[in-house]
Image (cartoon, rainbow, N blue to C red):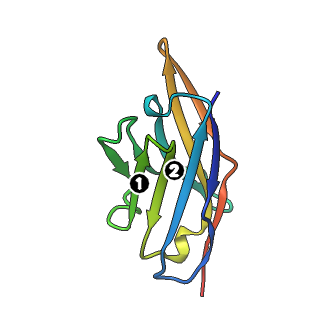
Amino acid sequence: QVQLVESGGGLVQPGGSLRLSCAASGATFSSVAMSWYRQAPGKARELVAGISSAGGSANYADSAKGRFTITRDNAKNTVTLQMNSLKPEDTAVYYCNAVRVVLAKRYVYWGQGTQVTVSS
């Protein structure tokens, strides 16, 4: 089992920044691929950014490229999403996601989510 706890959401004005953090426990963090997803009201959950288990590679949704940065600290078991130049359309509940592969079986874990609201 992997437990995930997000923090850092809130209300921010357009053009502002927020930093989301996700603390993980319950597994060897360095063996787990991590991602951030978001879900806006009435919309499907979508991938925002992902980072490999060792942190050597990251991928981003087109909407996040150039504005968001995902990083991880395997010593502290945390993954962070730095969000800059926020837009109203970034408003959503943001979820931390972990994927662990054990003996070719894929296990997926989710945090409880943190609300991000971008509004003036």
Quarter of the image with the C terminus is bottom right
Residue 29 placement (x, y as % from top left): 49, 34
**Does the CB distance between marks 2 and 1 fall below 8 Å?**
yes
On the image, the x and y values in percent for residue 80 come to 48, 55
Location of residue 92 by image quarter: bottom right
Q: Callout 1: helix, strand or loop?
A: strand
The image position of residue 115, as x and y in percent, is 66, 64
Residue 21 image label: none
Query: Looking at the image, how many numbered discs can be counted on the residues?
Result: 2
Mark 1 = which residue?
Answer: 70
Residue occupying the point 37% across, 58% down: 62
Name which residue type carries label 1. Ile
Q: Say what amino acid the circle numbered 2 marks.
A: Trp
Residue count near mark 2 (Cα–Cα under 10 Å), binned few <14, some 14–19, many ≥20: many
Q: Check disc 1: other Cα within 10 Å, few if <14, some if 14-19, many if 20+.
A: many
- Which residue is at the front of the view, 61 or 85? 85
At numbered mark 2, what does the secondary structure look like: helix, strand or loop?
Answer: strand
Taking the view exactly as shown, the residue that stands out farthest to the left is: 56
Q: Residue at x 66, y 53 (%)?
A: 113
Which mark is first along the chain, 1 or 2? 2
Q: Nearer the viewer, mark 2 or mark 1?
A: 1
- Where the N terminus falls, by quadrant? top right
Q: Position of 116 compared to 72: left or right? A: right
Q: CA distance from mark 2 to mark 1?
A: 8 Å
The residue identified by callout 2 is 36
Image point (57%, 55%), residue name: 38
Q: Residue at x 51, y 50 (%)?
A: 36
Give x and y (percent) for residue 107.
57, 25
**Relative depth, front residue between 92 and 44:** 92
Query: In this view, which residue lies farthest toward the bottom?
Result: 120
